[in-house]
């Protein structure tokens, strides 16, 4: 059993026998009624380092109110009732008080609301004020903004939103869109107490409307993408958090008196009932009796299904300053991670750039433990659209009671996230070349390229994509459909080209919506490029024998999980087979019957260094390549560590970084580098792999592996292609020779140097090849 599963079970078991900790009886507020306010005098906001399940078990004996979206290992925030702090400290837990008295924060917020200034975003706003603001926005710009309600909450309140759309080119006055644009949905406040998660989406809607026609980015965005905002998905809970209990999280369904509320963001159907949700009606994470038992989650679901042009969604929450992608319910990485992970990083970076408040990207299931039955996973899996959970400000200084002067900064950060994602939706499909476009292909041989179309503003159609190729930098492209390999991957053939020739290629595919998508970029104008070379492998090590690698460096300080050349047994984090079985280097053999953490790298770094290699052994460009395994997505402190891979050209005196491996792929990834891009190739070359665990209290599970290390040389022995006069450089003189020989070669028996590709005629293809190696020495 994995550690997180145990945590979840412990949590449920403990929560079952806890008394209610709030200090006042809750009265469900009828609209207009004066309800007693729940008070939290002396309740602290504390951050506790959860090292293992015993820690968590103990903490949950003293509080059930975890503050955050995912409960797991590592630092976790809790509301701590009076007396709890002393008991936790006495038990030796590492604890930091973020705020000594949550009631003081609540009172300060109430005072501030009472004297709220003129600006709408200077204060948090009631449900009525938010709804009035939506009406106001639609009235301001009826051409761009349309109001809608997706249905009523369990207490009968409408769930309202706005669509914002740019002008439709060619649309008549009679309504009806001439085109369908992809849409980005921004939904806020599934969790009642997360007030800024309602204000920020509303702010985005207003800024988009105000910026149309004035701000270039916004104008372009609205010409291509529809923005849909639903600021309050949980109106009953939101109202109740104003009238009665500021810290209310769930909706207001009466389950069984005195228990109210379902956690809407555990009520979605994908992985419903899994880890990080609860079947106990008293739990803050109560998932409901069945998936979509709640009108609020059901209406959002139906709205998305009724609007299949919604191609991406943000589910907005606070706090933690995180951009969390699918999956939330498992540590497995999603199939489209090569696109979605870098995109999440880009979104987080854009949010950080607004005001230097650091936002980071993570995997839902990695960064903070697991959550099942959440909107983001449903949108990704069922609606086939990209989705992220945005955790807005702050990082725990005030928790859910974010001071109102941070509403506008949080709104600006959400706007930045909206622009980055919206702009990506303007591309219908992205074409991901598996393991990256090849830097070189073997001369005179066809080469295979594997590609996966990834949904963006559209979905891929059923017909296979077309691969367009040409030899040389100019001339016509040849086109052929690609072959499906399963799992959405296609294969196509790059043509055999003479050594030194460049090959250009790009992809084209019809979307499910019937539009044409090309890539990369503009296709024929910005194709992928590779060069045909003769390749000689001078060193290849699959570790079947000991070739003199050193599995330790003098300054290594790891205490466990050291590099070994083994046939691995495998764990959740470690491969059970080498890429080339049986042997490879792995950071420590698994301990049978023990979890992954038992064989993980511990206490510092462990270094694997190659024997001395000769990067001048053959003519041409020297390339180093390897297969690597890396895992830091199990246990605690997930996604915090990295493996450094470095190269030296002076026999290990000095080192230069090739890459810091961070991807948790559960597979052997190929990496290949041109040595001259990092260091001058010499005969004293070494490569090393440094796996390490520098996490606080050794929380991380780190596993690494290395196999199939190669040193290769790519060259064209005859000199640069297109050097028709043999002077060692491709220039105007060669071009003159080519143009002077234009047309069929006069005599097949005689040399015809300008017929570069040897097809018996000097034509545009030869011209393309010569231009492709222009200036080559
Ligand atoms: Zn939330």
Image: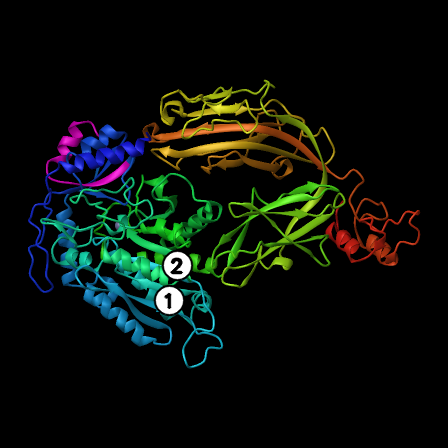
Is residue 408 visible in the rendered structure shown here? no
Is residue 672 visible in the rendered structure shown here? yes
User: Extreme bottom residue here?
Assistant: 173
Q: Position of residue 702 (x, y in %)?
A: 41, 29
Task: Classify the position of the N terminus by image quarter.
Answer: top left
Q: Is residue 157 above or below residue 345?
A: below
Count residues near mark 1 (Cα–Cα under 10 Å), then give few for <14, some for 14-19, many for 20+.
many
Q: Nearer the viewer, residue 620 or 36?
A: 36
Labelled pair 1, 2 in contact (Cβ < 8 Å): yes
Q: Nearer the viewer, residue 419 or 482?
A: 482
The region drawn magenta spans 75-94
Residue 80 belongs to the span the image colors magenta:
yes
Q: Position of residue 144 (x, y in %)?
A: 37, 73
Which residue, given by chain and number where applicable, does mark 2 sit on? 418
Q: Residue at x 78, y 44 (%)?
A: 720
Which residue, given by chain and number where applicable, does mark 1 sit on? 208
Q: Position of residue 731 (x, y in %)?
A: 79, 52
Left or right? Give the position of 165 relative to 397. Answer: right
Q: What is the secondary structure assignment of the residue under circle 1? A: helix
Q: How many marks?
A: 2
Q: What is the secondary structure assignment of the residue under circle 2? A: helix
Q: Is residue 184 above or below residue 339?
A: below
């Amino acid at each position: 059993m994995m550690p997180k599963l145990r945590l979840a079970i412990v949590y449920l078991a403990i929560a079952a026998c806890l008394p209610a900790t709030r200090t006042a009886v809750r009265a469900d507020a009828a609209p207009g009624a004066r309800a007693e306010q729940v008070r939290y005098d002396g309740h602290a906001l504390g951050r506790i380092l959860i090292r293992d399940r015993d820690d968590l078990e103990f903490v949950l004996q003293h509080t059930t109110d975890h503050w955050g979206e995912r409960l797991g290992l590592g630092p976790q925030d809790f509301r701590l009732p009076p007396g709890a702090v002393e008991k936790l400290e006495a038990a030796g837990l590492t604890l930091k008080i973020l705020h000594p008295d949550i009631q003081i924060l609540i009172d300060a917020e109430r005072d501030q609301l009472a004297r709220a200034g003129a600006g709408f975003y200077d204060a948090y706003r009631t449900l009525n004020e938010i709804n009035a603001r939506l009406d106001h926005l639609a009235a301001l710009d009826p051409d761009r903004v349309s109001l809608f309600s997706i249905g009523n909450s369990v207490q009968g309140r409408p769930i309202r939103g706005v669509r914002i759309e740019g002008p439709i080119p060619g649309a008549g006055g009679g309504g009806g869109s001439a085109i369908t644009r992809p849409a980005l949905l921004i939904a806020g406040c599934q969790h009642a107490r997360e007030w800024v998660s309602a204000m920020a989406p509303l702010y985005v809607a207003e800024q988009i409307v105000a910026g149309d026609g004035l701000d270039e980015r916004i104008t372009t965005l609205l010409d291509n993408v529809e923005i849909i905002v639903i600021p309050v998905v949980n109106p009953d809970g939101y109202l109740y958090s104003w009238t009665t209990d500021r810290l209310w999280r769930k909706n207001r369904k009466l389950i069984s008196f005195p228990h109210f509320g379902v956690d809407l963001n555990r009520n979605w159907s994908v992985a419903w009932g899994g880890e990080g949700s609860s079947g106990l009606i008293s739990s803050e994470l109560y998932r409901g009796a069945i998936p979509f038992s709640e009108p609020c989650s059901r209406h959002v679901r139906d709205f998305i299904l009724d609007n299949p042009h919604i191609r991406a969604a943000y589910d907005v929450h606070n706090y933690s300053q995180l951009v969390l992608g699918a999956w939330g319910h498992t540590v497995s990485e999603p199939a489209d991670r090569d696109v979605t992970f870098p995109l999440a990083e880009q979104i987080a970076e854009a949010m950080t750039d607004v005001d230097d408040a650091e936002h980071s990207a993570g995997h839902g299931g990695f960064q903070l433990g697991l959550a099942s039955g959440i909107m983001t996973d449903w949108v990704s899996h069922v609606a086939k659209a990209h989705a992220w959970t945005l955790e807005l400000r702050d990082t725990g200084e005030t928790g859910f009671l974010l001071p109102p002067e941070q509403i506008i900064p949080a709104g600006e950060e959400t706007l930045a996230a909206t622009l980055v994602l919206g702009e990506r939706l303007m591309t219908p499909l992205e074409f991901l070349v598996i393991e990256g476009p090849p830097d070189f292909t073997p001369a005179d041989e066809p080469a295979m390229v594997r590609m996966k179309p990834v949904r963006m503003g559209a979905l891929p159609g059923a017909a296979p994509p077309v691969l367009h190729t040409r030899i040389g930098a100019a001339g016509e492209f040849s086109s052929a459909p690609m072959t499906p390999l399963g799992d959405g991957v296609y294969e196509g053939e790059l043509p055999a080209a003479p050594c030194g020739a460049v090959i250009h290629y790009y992809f084209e595919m019809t979307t499910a919506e019937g539009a044409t998508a090309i890539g990369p970029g503009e296709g024929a104008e910005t194709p992928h490029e590779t060069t045909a070379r003769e390749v000689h492998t001078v060193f290849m090590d699959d570790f079947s024998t000991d070739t003199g690698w050193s599995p330790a460096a003098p300054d290594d300080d790891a205490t466990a999980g050291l590099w070994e050349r083994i046939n691995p047994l495998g764990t959740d984090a470690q491969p059970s087979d080498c890429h080339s079985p049986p042997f490879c280097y792995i950071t420590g053999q698994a301990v049978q019957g023990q979890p992954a953490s038992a064989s993980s790298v511990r206490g510092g770094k462990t270094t694997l260094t190659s024997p001395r290699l000769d990067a001048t052994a053959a003519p041409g460009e020297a390339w180093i390549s390897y297969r690597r395994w890396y895992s830091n997505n199990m246990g605690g402190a997930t996604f915090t560590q990295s493996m450094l891979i470095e190269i030296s050209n002076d026999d290990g005196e000095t080192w230069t970084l090739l890459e810091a491996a961070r991807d948790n792929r559960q597979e052997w990834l190929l990496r290949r580098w041109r040595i001259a891009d990092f260091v001058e190739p010499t005969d004293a070359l070494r490569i090393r792999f440094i796996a390490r665990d520098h996490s606080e209290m050794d929380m991380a599970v780190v596993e690494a592996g290395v196999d199939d290390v190669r040193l290769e040389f790519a060259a064209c022995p005859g000199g640069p292609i297109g050097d028709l006069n043999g002077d060692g450089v491709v220039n105007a003189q060669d071009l003159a020779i080519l143009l002077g020989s234009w047309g069929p070669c006069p005599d097949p028996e005689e040399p015809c140097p300008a017929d570069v590709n040897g097809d018996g005629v000097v034509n545009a293809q030869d011209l393309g090849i010569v231009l492709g190696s222009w200036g080559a020495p």
